[in-house]
Amino acid sequence: MLKFFELENHEVMVFRIWTILAGVFIPVFGLFLLYFVEGAIDNMVHRCLLSFYWLFFLGASFLNDTIKKYLSIPCFIGNFITIAWIIWIVNQNSFSTNYSTGLFLCLSGIAIINRSNIEMVIFYIFSFILLFYSFYFYPEVEISKAIFLLSVFILFIIHIVVMGKRDYINYSLKTLNQKLRLKNNRLKQLIFVSSHDLKTPLWNISSFSSLLESDLTEGKLELSEKEYYLKLIIGSIKNIDRKLDDLRDYFKHDNTEIEFDYFDLEKKLISIQNKIRNENPNTHIEFDIDKGMPPKIVGNEYQLGQLFYRLIDNGIKYNESETKKIKLSYLLDSKYHVFSIRDNGIGIEMKYKDRIFDLFQRLHMENEFSGTGVGLAICKVIVENHKGDIWLESGKLDEWSEFCFKIPKRILLKK
């Protein structure tokens, strides 16, 4: 519950400006009314108490971060206290033009300072109740009650529009900040893993090149040793090349601004099956595709094609069975397309279910199974681009693994 009241850092400055305005202008406005308006009824003690309330919390805003974080609570309460007293003093002056002006200024200021539409609606409901009470229980009020309430209602609608626009801007900024944080996290991860995964083959190249260089002057290496070192150098160069290519693919897919359209899922899966068979001509592969697969879905055809291909290809690549079996299932859900891809390969232990989607994370040595550890990271990026989720549903070492992913169901109006 308290989470709702937490102030962002930029809101603390707004809070301070508001407390200064309220703390100064509440008593100053009263002094002006008493001086310039003949017969004005006012209470400067009350105004000074209200001023002290706001200035007290202005001082509190310069204390520790915990106090600053929850200053919206006294602000929220203080707004109700302030408007209640102002409606009372305005009623004492029979809603004269001068005092009504102050009421409208106060309503406008407090409504703007509210942090959400919910706060503003609560505030205006409270204000309307007090106005009705003043109008119908104090008969000495001589103004047109209907006109006054209509004016406040119009003010309320204007603030709804303003707050709606502000909420939209805040939401857009929050979304952009989330994307920026995600990009920064991925960049940090890339820098971290690159410093190790790209550095290792470079170290191999440097070390074995130095050995070959020393042999040019000393001639101590046998021909078989030279061939072995050259083979390791060439392998390391190819390893770097593969990793750089996969990194390029990773960042090519790491783009949330993708186009969505209807595409034929059935044809796409047939195309992927043919591609897999052509790449593995001497391998016996069995595909079992759920009859309940939707014929068409909305998404980015290229990226989703890559997603299905990479998950299926993993089930073939990391598989030592004579007959490699791939089962594609579709799970019914009201909001999402949920797909499952299961294989009879070497399996994955569930304790690695989070780690396997990170860049350059491999569970096997390169001499056991080829790969760079980028494929599943690309799959995760593609699913995130579609506002979905991907996970390892189940796995058992030396028996099977099952990956699931879901993407929201979408309807395009142009089709």
Image (spheres, grey):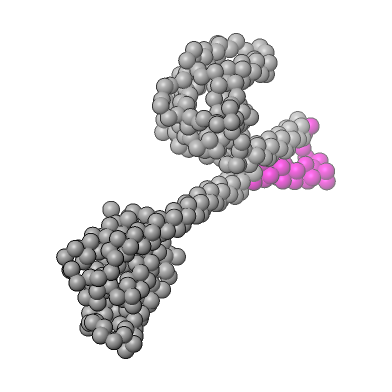
Give whichever of 289, 89 is nearer the camera.
Answer: 89
**Is 142 above or below relative to 47?**
above
Whether residue 79 is visible, yes or no, is yes
Q: Residue furthest left?
A: 137
Question: Picture coordinates of residue 177 (x, y %)?
Answer: 51, 53
Give whichever of 181, 48 is nearer the camera.
Answer: 48
> Which quadrant would residue 305 be assigned to in this image?
top right
In the image, taking residue 367 as reference, residue 329 lies left or right, namely left
Question: Picture coordinates of residue 178 (x, y %)?
Answer: 50, 50
Q: Residue at left 63%, top 41%?
A: 251
Give whichever of 8, 35 is nearer the camera.
Answer: 35
Image: magenta residue range: 199-223
Q: Residue at left 50%, top 37%?
A: 387
Q: Residue at left 25%, top 85%?
A: 39
Whether residue 243 is visible, yes or no, is no
Marker count (numbered): 0
Give whichever of 316, 140 is nearer the camera.
Answer: 140
In the image, taking residue 219 as reference, residue 331 lies left or right, namely left
Q: Residue furthest right?
A: 217
Question: Picture coordinates of residue 289 (x, y %)?
Answer: 52, 14
> Which quadrant would residue 88 be assigned to in this image?
bottom left
**Is 45 above or below relative to 254?**
below
Q: Main secondary structure of the magenta part?
A: helix
Question: Picture coordinates of residue 235 (x, y %)?
Answer: 71, 34
